[in-house]
Image: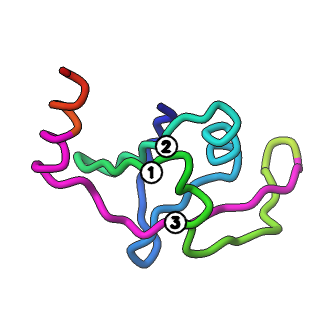
Amino acid sequence: MIRKVITTLYEGLAPIHEKYIKQAKDSKQDLQIVYGKDEMTIPYRQLKERIVKWTGGNRDKFDGTHYSIAYFNWTPATEEDKLKEFSKQCL
């Protein structure tokens, strides 16, 4: 699982750098987004369809390369979801 910790939400959306999405797709791993004490997991097969918005044309301040940011609706897992996931792992 690819785990990305974010520190801010943008209008209820979770911003994720394109490199993490590409990494999850290439390795066929789910993407876990953590914000504060909450987390949500996006299965790698649903990454493309769960993206709400893309922004492009951003420039890296260190090496000058261009990159895009994808935004996902922030829907953190409930305690019930976490228990279901835990029970799947135990079986």
Q: Is residue 46 magenta?
A: no
Query: Which label number is shown at residue 42?
Result: 1
Which residue type carries mark 2?
Leu
- At numbered mark 3, what does the secondary structure look like: helix, strand or loop? helix
Q: Are marks 1 and 2 in contact (CB under 8 Å)?
A: yes
Residue with the most extreme front position: 91
Query: Which label number is shown at residue 71?
Result: none
Which residue type carries mark 3?
Arg
Which mark is first along the chain, 3 or 2? 2
Which residue type carries mark 1?
Ile
Image coordinates for residue 72, horizontal then vertical, percent = 49, 65
Q: Which residue is mark 3?
A: 50
User: Gap in Å between the C-alphas at discs 2 and 3?
Assistant: 11 Å
Question: To which quarter of the image does residue 56 belong?
Answer: bottom right
Which mark is first along the chain, 2 or 1? 2
Residue at x 88%, y 50% (from the top left corner)? 65
Q: Which residue is mark 2?
A: 31
Q: Are marks 3 and 1 in contact (CB under 8 Å)?
A: yes
Local crowd size for mark 2, using a 10 Å CA cut-off: few (<14), some (14–19), many (≥20): many
- At numbered mark 1, what does the secondary structure look like: helix, strand or loop? strand
- At numbered mark 2, what does the secondary structure look like: helix, strand or loop? strand
Residue at x 49%, y 43% (from the top left corner)? 31
Residue with the most extreme bottom position: 11
User: Gap in Å between the C-alphas at discs 1 and 2?
Assistant: 5 Å
Residue at x 79%, y 56% (from the top left corner)? 67
Which residues make up the magenta segment?
64-84
Residue at x 31%, y 64% (from the top left corner)? 75
User: Gap in Å between the C-alphas at discs 3 and 1?
Assistant: 8 Å
Image coordinates for residue 57, horizontal then vertical, percent = 82, 68
